[in-house]
Amino acid sequence: MSGWIAIAGLGPGRETLVTPEVSQALAEASDVLGYIPYVARVAPREGLVLHASDNRVELQRATHALEMAAAGRRVVVVSSGDPGVFAMAAAVFEALEQGPPEWLSLDIRVLPGITAMLAASARAGAPLGHDFCAINLSDNLKPWALIERRLRLAAEADFAMAFYNPRSKARPEGFTRTLEVLREACGADRPILFARAVSTPEEHLRVTTLGEASPDMADMRTVVIVGSSRTRLIPREGAPILYTPRSAE
Amino acid sequence: MSGWIAIAGLGPGRETLVTPEVSQALAEASDVLGYIPYVARVAPREGLVLHASDNRVELQRATHALEMAAAGRRVVVVSSGDPGVFAMAAAVFEALEQGPPEWLSLDIRVLPGITAMLAASARAGAPLGHDFCAINLSDNLKPWALIERRLRLAAEADFAMAFYNPRSKARPEGFTRTLEVLREACGADRPILFARAVSTPEEHLRVTTLGEASPDMADMRTVVIVGSSRTRLIPREGAPILYTPRSAE
């Protein structure tokens, strides 16, 4: 087999945040697969086949990608952000485990990217500058009780927290409940950042408190960061700087 | 003031993991500051002053950088990995808060990079593919009791865990204790990844279990990842693939 598969992170949006390693893989690929808006970020060229698919079909997409690599194609599966953070890498390995044993000898690489929470953190200051956790709030793949348990334990551990997929039209009530749990566990004064579409022309950042936060401040293009008890605001003209000091005391 | 300051992430080591945004800032800089081995990664050129300093002087380095930017220099403070994850961004904002009010109007940007845990995760598969936390095990800046408390709560929340600065010659006992706490909380069979110097010529990855892990498997160039209860190994020729499925059940 001379085919290969790379699961590549396109970063949060701006082209200057795509690593040269990922650009190189895209330049060598015969096929690119991914969710429609991510494939739309890849420039078409002679000899490159673009396979855009809807979301919620990750496992089928992963299987298709592995089949093509096994057939000798040079395949890049694209994710936004980092493919290893709530993205396509895990789906490809799930498909690999379910597939024929010969897939195990495929040339498979994961190419990291700038994940949304770190792009958002950089834009706002350094809210993830000390211990933190990352939680996917989508309850497609896990029960709400587990999400709520993790929120409470993360607050007890005094982690800063980053939330992916905070809110969809199909299930707005989950994020409402998240804010209630966090207000109870962390207090109304705790800072919260809503960072939408970071590094794109639609970028919008809002820093507020849990007491002032409302569910409609997030949509599916928003990453949400809640500070730890140590997180500080530096007020200045324009947006304040939000950061968590290195020291825990 | 026409000076500016950028706090930039050089990624884990390989040049093809440096974002074009960071390369551009380095090309425009008049001064680059950082810990000695990170500044050594920046190519010298006419008109660029390199200021390499030891570690444990982060706050002095940050103050110096802000002073130079305020004096009109074009300053890049370099971190390895991502500057917002246990690195220089928080130190610069600490210095900013302690400095003169005119520094608040400085042009300050944080330029994200590929952080060590995500580079390590990509090399091993996708162990951080579901909810996870990141903990700095250095007890320079926080008491051991807080670290141990966070370890126990993270295990109870069933997060995958990434550990930075696991072990130094000056305080080897902390990581020994970390492994004991995790064995007790997660069981001896839980997979653990030791990823040293990822993406450099000295890269070395080892996947084992908490039961088989020993403190000497980590040094200060190692990032350590412990799986959640859902993390799986796919055995194959050469290194196994370590990944955490997207679904929690």
Image (tube, coloured by chain):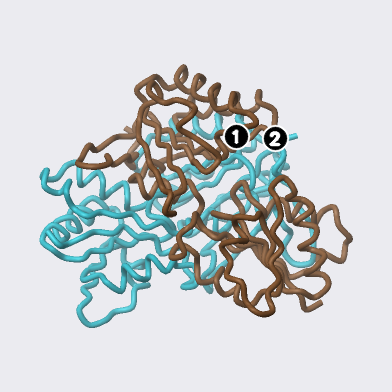
Chain colours: A cyan, B brown
Q: Is residue B191 above or below residue A121?
A: above
Q: Residue at x 44, y 59 (%)?
A: A113
Chain letter behind tag 1 = B
Residue B102 location, x and y as percent? Answer: 87, 66
Total number of numbered labels? 2
Residue sitting at the far right = B100
Q: Residue at x 51, y 45 (%)?
A: A175
Left or right side of A67 for B173: right
Sort mark 1 into few (<14), some (14-19) or many (20+) by Cα contacts within 10 Å: some
Which amino acid type is marked by label 1?
Answer: Ser
Q: Is residue B20 above or below residue A241?
A: below
Image quarter where the C terminus of chain A lies is: top right
Left or right side of A64 for B49: right
Task: Give the CA separation, mark 1 to mark 2.
Answer: 11 Å
Left or right side of A60 for A128: right
Report the residue marked by disc 2: B140
Q: In the picture, residue B149 is in which quadrant?
A: top right
Front residue (pair B104, A223): B104
Which amino acid type is marked by label 2?
Answer: Asn
Residue A18 location, x and y as percent? Answer: 44, 67
Instruction: Work out whether disc 1 and disc 2 sit on a shared chain.
Output: yes
Report the residue marked by disc 1: B168
Front residue (pair A87, B60): B60
Q: Is residue B146 above or below residue B199?
A: above
Q: Element under label 1?
A: loop
Image quarter where the N terminus of chain A lies is: bottom left
Q: Residue at x 51, y 57 (%)?
A: B11
Q: Element under label 2?
A: loop
